[in-house]
Amino acid sequence: MDNKELAQLLEETGVLKRLAGENDFKAAAYDRAARQIENMETPIAEYIEGENVDSISGIGKSLATQIYAYADTGRLPVLDALHEQIPSGLIKWLDIPGLGPKKIYKVHRELGITEMAELVEKCRDGSVAELKGMGEKTAEKILSSIAFMEKFGERCRADQAASVAKTFNDFLFGQPGVDAISLAGSSRRRLETIGDIDILVAAKELHSPSIMEAFTTHPDVVEILAKGDTKSSIRTREGRQVDLRVIPEKHFAAALMYFTGSKEHNIATRARARERGMALNEYGLFQLDDKGDTNFDEPVNTKTEADIYRELDLPFIEPELREDRGEFAWFESHEKIDLLQAADIQGILHAHSTWSDGACTIHEMALGCIERGYSYLGLTDHSRAAAYAGGLTAERVEAQWKEIDQVNQQLADEGHCFHVFKGIESDILGNGELDYEEEILAGFDFIIASVHSALDMEAGKMLERMQKAAANPYCTIIGHPTGRLLLKRKGSEMDLNALVEHCADHKTVIEINANPRRLDLDWRYGRKAHECGMMTSINPDAHNLQMLDDMEYGVGVARKGWYNPERVLNTKSLEEISTWFETPKNERI
DNA sequence: GCCGTTTTCGGCCCGACTGTTTTCAGTCG
């Protein structure tokens, strides 16, 4: 039994309680307990053994009873009971924008349906519109939302969102009366997938209507979901939802904080304000009087987000950390957090050339790195098992080494202080071995070991395979550990906590693949990595020059995973990393 | 369902927008 598994069951209980029409605060208690247990570093089993589960904050007598029962029987009684009452088909309905738990339960109860297809049918034949509290427009909205979901899916990758965000950001910035503009929401928090794009504009009230008008009539807009004086939502032809909020400049800091979220982080900051006799909303921070009333015309003077946090006895919390995943607890005992910055990165460690499936020569890739301010390139073409990608035979490896020597000489002659390292992206074979004989392996400066075949291996076997590769003295870095493709392919479900620990023990680095399609290792394992001292490397896996710019996404994810520069391999200078590569693996720090 | 140096009961983050109402519930972020 692990914390994650229990947390998932508690979360599902919260969802079903809402669908069952129970008090929202009760449902929220299950959400809170789930988050608490998921973020705890102590295994829940220790509390169960010590019979002090209810000493965990947010868990009282009732939840503790459930958890003990789960320890005994492997089942959560409250969840089993809810499953009897609520068909699981309804959970999917929650993904339909505009349809929440109350309406879902009403439709289910009164029309006796549980499947999405039945819902479509009942919206079309008018049954839904006839229900009390519903109507024609509600039914139409449900139909259009379902059609939209089927066409585009609910979320998109961060890079896709960035391109839509840029279009609207540039457009709005040019509108008369716009004093300031900022991206907010999950894009600002650097989440790997984005639901909708949130943009915040500061403008005087008199300009608001014309800004809203310009926004909702932009040529990319195919549907207006809502339009008000301060808030509007649209859908773009790429299928993305964009929310715009226009507020006077004096509210900008509070609004940015509110609009950036996460929802859970906001709930916690507002509760914190309450504890200090204040109230926080998107218009500012307000002092409450004895009766709990306040004058909303006179906020506490806070010009920036940092000012608001300071009033709540906190340092500025970087947007990437605002997930209510331990950031408040951290600042109870620490004054600051040292987070990786893009400028800390000194070199590139995962890139391909025309020797395998890359688009550019070694020299071109090196110049691309120099242009971007890096001081080294670890070239890693594919190994021989990756025949589909032009993987290198042992003979071609040796020929490539000669070319790398020539390129290094040429770059030195041209006056560049830059070095190309001889690396390889070695396939991890089905049995966990690397792809060359030892004498070839020993000739590389470093090796990235990645799985490119038999991806759907059973999780336990996959973990053994990865652990064997990671323990190999020639394996420097594990590449894209799960093989996931965001929103497309799930990736291996092996126990990543176990892999992180194993790699920390063997001084093997696990990369954060910066390709926005992967972003693998996931940031959620950052705390585990921190706890056991695992190092990472932010790697673009570049197959052309443009992909070198994907580093931005990798850095965002590393920040989200709480990595400091010391735990990121490619923050080392050229000199430091040369020494590090030369040091035998088991002696590395 | 949880929680408490104002509290063991009565709160729990809070406001905008929509649709269905005729003063408000539901949804969203």
Image: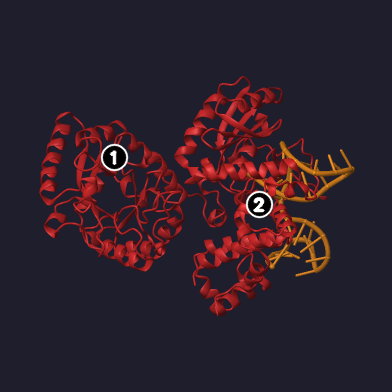
Q: Nearer the viewer, residue A67 or A376?
A: A67
Q: Judge from the rendering whether residue A18 lies leftward or rightward of residue A416; answer left or right.
A: right
- Graded by Cα atoms within 10 Å as few (under 14), some (14 to 19) or many (20 or more), the crowding at tag 2 reads many
Identity, as a three-letter code, of the amino acid under mark 1: His
Q: Position of residue A321 (x, y in %)?
A: 52, 49
Parent chain of label 1? A
Callout 1: helix, strand or loop? Answer: loop
Q: Position of residue A565 (x, y in %)?
A: 38, 48
State the residue lying farthest toward the front. Answer: A125
Q: Colour of chain A?
A: red
Identity, as a three-letter code, of the amino acid under mark 2: Leu
Q: Nearer the viewer, residue A45 or A457?
A: A457
Q: Is residue A48 visible?
A: yes
To which residue does mark 1 refer? A543
- Eyeballing the image, is B2 above or below A305? below
Residue drawn at (65%, 39%), measured in percent from left and top?
A: A254
Parent chain of label 2? A
To which residue does mark 2 refer? A119
Q: Colour of chain B?
A: orange
